Image: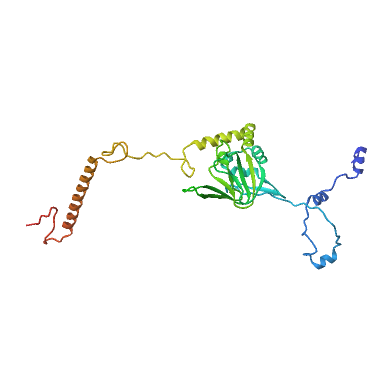
Amino acid sequence: MSVEPADAAALEQPQQSLSTAAARNLATTTKTVPQMQEISSRWLLRMLPWVNVAGGTYRVNRRLTYAVGGGQVAFAQTAGQVTVVPPSLREIPLFAGLDDDAALAALADGFTQQEVEAGAVIAERGQAADRLYLVTHGRVNRLGAGHFDEGTVLGVVADGGYFGADTLADGGDWDYSAVAGTACTLLSLERSRFLELADQLPALAGQVRRFGEAAARPQNKRGEADIAITSGHSDEPGRRARGGGRTRHARGDGRARHQRGAVARRATVGQRRERVRLPGREVAVPGGNRPD
């Protein structure tokens, strides 16, 4: 078999790429156990050439995880900066059906961080509710008016909780006062910024519209869909159209029904007594008659 000059020149050229074994060696990550002077074995400390350094940099591989379906919003913290995890905003009923990740990311970027001291009034009852609050750390007490105008605790919002979402779309006033029970770190989204995002993002506007339609449907006190049940009485004799009082005729009818019921009960008792008596003995019959 003859070899052409061009093929011979190609065979003589040196390899310019890695071999399969070398490429596999570079692609395979070799991890060693972290070593330091305090925890490493003494024989290893004597064997390895240790070099003292004044400082250095390192990278930590981080994986973000958050719970889904727990009703709480998740947060990510880097140094002193806290941000909300965009997909966890679906835990808020207003954003529960929002499938657009870009819209959720835009909402998350609209929150601003706020630090409050214990005892600070975050929202006051009767004032305009103009923002949504997320509690990243701390405890917020929801205070309302009691029966005698004294303050009463309606609930406590802690880490991962939120308040103010019910008036974010349609506006309104605060039904309660929010007071910081401890030092808190909050994230707040202004209603004006929310309305701007709703105008810019069709997916967000559609979700707000669907939420409003669902909220307008009849609901029970637990927020569940109300089941319409028809019950009651019509054309009941002896009742007035208004006031609910009974007439004299109604009271008379009630007394007559009571007397008839008493006579029927006495007759039933007499019949029972007649059945349980042995034959041949004197028996009691209804009406007080005795056998001859």
- For residue 2, say whether it is visible: no
Tell me the quarter of the picture where residue 206 sits: top right
Q: Please state the horizontal and vertical placement of residue 75, each as a whole percent of the image.
A: 65, 47
Q: Is residue 85 visible?
A: yes
Identify the residue at the far bottom of this view.
42
Residue 172 sits in quarter: top right
Residue 86: x and y, percent? Answer: 65, 42
Residue found at the very far left of the displayed protein: 292
Quarter of the image for the N terminus: give it: top right
Query: What colouring does the structure picture have?
Result: rainbow
| 280 to 63, vertically: above or below | below
Apparent side of residue 43 relative to residue 104 in the rendered image (left or right):
right
Decide if residue 14 is on the left or right side of residue 247.
Answer: right
Which residue is at 20% across, 52% downward? 265
Task: Pick whichever, 27 or 174, lies toward us.
Answer: 174
Left or right: where 282 falls relative to 114: left
Q: Residue at x 81, y 49 (%)?
A: 23
Give the camera-side residue of 22 and 53.
53
Which part of the image, by quadrant, shows the C terminus?
bottom left
Count of numbered tags: 0
Residue 12 appears in which quarter of the rendering?
top right
